[in-house]
Image (tube, grey):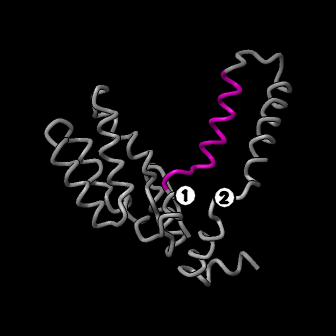
Amino acid sequence: MIFSVDGLSGLKEGIEATFPRAEIQRCIIHQLRNCFKYVSYKHLKEFSKDFKAVYQAASEEIARDKFEEVKKKWQSSYPFAIKSWENNWEVLIPFYKFPEEIRKIMYTTNIIEGFHRQLRKVTKSKAIFPNDESLEKMLFLVAKNVMKKWTQRYKNWDMVLNQLMIMYPERVEKFIR
């Protein structure tokens, strides 16, 4: 139904071939991080704040206007960062078709990356494991702990579910019966 993806080459095409009716949304955080490589460290905070007005805009039209303001401000200093947004605009805007509650999920949550981050946190803090089994046990316990959080209800889920059922009744209803 909805895929939030990073900029991995060929991923969009693969999804479109397999799920032709899917909405494909480029992860805003990945897009920001990708263009940060073109921005001086001293401007990162301000640059990020300016783009926040773009991706948190109430509509695609407002986002486009905000982007034009950002472009005017930063184009001369960081043309490649701006070009990156222009080149990817069509995969950065699909989430404007959705209500705000759904948008928040689409651009702020990446459960797989969060899971990997928790695993890395544990393995980095303990440099040496006596054997493979001790590493496996540690990773199992971390995974078990992380998965407990997955059973918690998402804030405003009832509203999100109702909005999805209105937008995609034939796709959603078969999974909630």
Main secondary structure found in the magenta portion:
helix
Answer whether labels 1 and 2 touch (C-beta < 8 Å). yes
Residue flagged by tag 2: what amino acid is it?
Tyr
* Of the pair 52 and 143, the residue shown nearer to us: 52
On-image quarter of the N terminus: bottom right
Q: What stretch is highlighted in magenta?
A: 107-124
**Mark 1 neighbour class, 10 Å CA radius: few under 14, some 14 to 19, many 20 or more:** some
On-image quarter of the C terminus: bottom right
Q: At 31% across and 26% down in the image, what residue appears?
A: 41
Instruction: Please determine whether, in this image, residue 145 is positioned above or below residue 169.
Output: above
Whole-number angstrom distance, CA of label 1 to CA of label 2: 9 Å
Can you identify the residue that label 1 sits on? 105
Q: Residue 139: horizontal and vertical position, in percent? A: 78, 33
Q: In which image quadrant can residue 130 be found?
A: top right
Q: Which of marks 1 and 2 is in front?
A: 2
Q: At 32% across and 33% down in the image, what residue appears?
A: 44
**Mark 2 neighbour class, 10 Å CA radius: few under 14, some 14 to 19, many 20 or more:** few
Q: Residue 102: horizontal and vertical position, in percent? A: 53, 64
Q: Is residue 62 left or right of residue 106?
A: left
Q: In this view, does 138 lie to the left or right of 99?
A: right
* Of the pair 125 and 58, the residue shown nearer to us: 58
Can you identify the residue that label 2 sits on? 154
Q: Residue 128: horizontal and vertical position, in percent? A: 74, 15
Residue flagged by tag 1: what amino acid is it?
Ile
Mark 1 falls on what kind of element? helix
Q: In this view, does 103 lie to the left or right of 60?
A: right
Q: Does the magenta stretch include residue 98?
A: no
Q: Residue 70: horizontal and vertical position, in percent? A: 22, 48
